[in-house]
Image: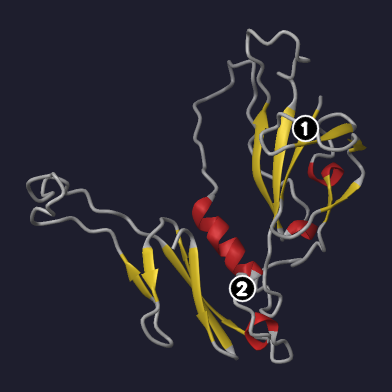
Amino acid sequence: MPAMAYIEDSATRITLATKQPLGVASLSSGQLEVMLDRRLNQDDNRGVGQGVLDNVIPTLNSFRLLVEPRIASCKGSHGGRRPDGYPSLSAHRSLHGLLYPVHQLVADNQDDSPEKLHDNFKPALSPSGSDIHVVNLRTGTQLPDNQAVEPSSSSVSLVLHRLGFDCCFPPSGLVVSNSEGEFSLDRLFPDYFGNRVRSMSLTSLQHQGPDIEKSFTIALRPMEIYTFELQP
């Protein structure tokens, strides 16, 4: 179980989100078994020669359990007999809360520093992007021996992931559940970066398609990852 597992019937789904990868099995109907990390008390005959008894630090495991009712008029993948399945949008957000928590940083008095820190936090995404995940936002670099390539130290690569989700479960706690795959970089960064946006490969090494304007509405397909290069 890298991140999530669920069991369901025609009326209810139980989803288990985990912060750490663990083994999982469903040995019988209606049962979900998770194997936690353990340490050996004796030799495992794989070269150690003894049990691992010197590691006394406990392993912390974090989970979130969601019980979600299915919309009665929606059959989804269960009714269609499909072998695949997607988490609900609420399950996606619950998992992201485990994997990407908001860290609060405490700084010393900055009155004498020329760089002023912001004293408040405002999420950049508008409520219309609940099914779009900002994977990464990284600055570009240039190798010293690569003089033929246009310098890109001032560029920024934005990696987006359009979530695939099961719409048969109501998105509890979300203001807007679905963007229909429409995304605008101008809504994400209204006051930052220039007007030119370049579509790139996942590694940001190759251009893919023509340049677009920042105000252009981009169509993102479910379960796809997109990379865009932003210029100052």
Q: Position of residue 219 (x, y in %)?
A: 85, 54
For label 2, the residue is: 85
Q: Position of residue 160 (x, y in %)?
A: 71, 47
Label 2, residues with CA under 10 Å away: few <14, some 14-19, many ≥20: few
Badge 2 amino acid: Gly
- Disc 1 residue crowd, few under 14, some 14–19, many 20+, Cα 10 Å: many
Q: Secondary structure at mark 1?
A: strand
Q: Nearer the viewer, residue 156 or 126?
A: 156
Please name which of the two marks, 2 or 1, marks the residue nearer to the observer: 2
Give the camera-side residue of 138 and 21: 21
Please identify the quadrant where the N terminus is shown: bottom left
Whole-Å distance between the Cαs marked 2 and 1?
Answer: 32 Å
Identified at 54% across, 61% down, the residue is 95
Q: Quadrant of the C terminus?
A: top right
- The answer to whether residue 92 shows anywhere in this view is yes
Give the structural element (helix, strand or loop) at label 2.
loop
Q: In the figure, is residue 159 to the left or right of 18?
A: right
Tell whether 195 sits left or right of 67: right
The amino acid on which the numbered mark 1 sits, given as a three-letter code, is: Glu
Of the residues under marks 2 and 1, which one precedes in the sequence? 2
How far from the left and from the top, in percent, is residue 161? Answer: 69, 51
The disc placed on residue 229 is: 1
Q: Quadrant of residue 175?
A: bottom right
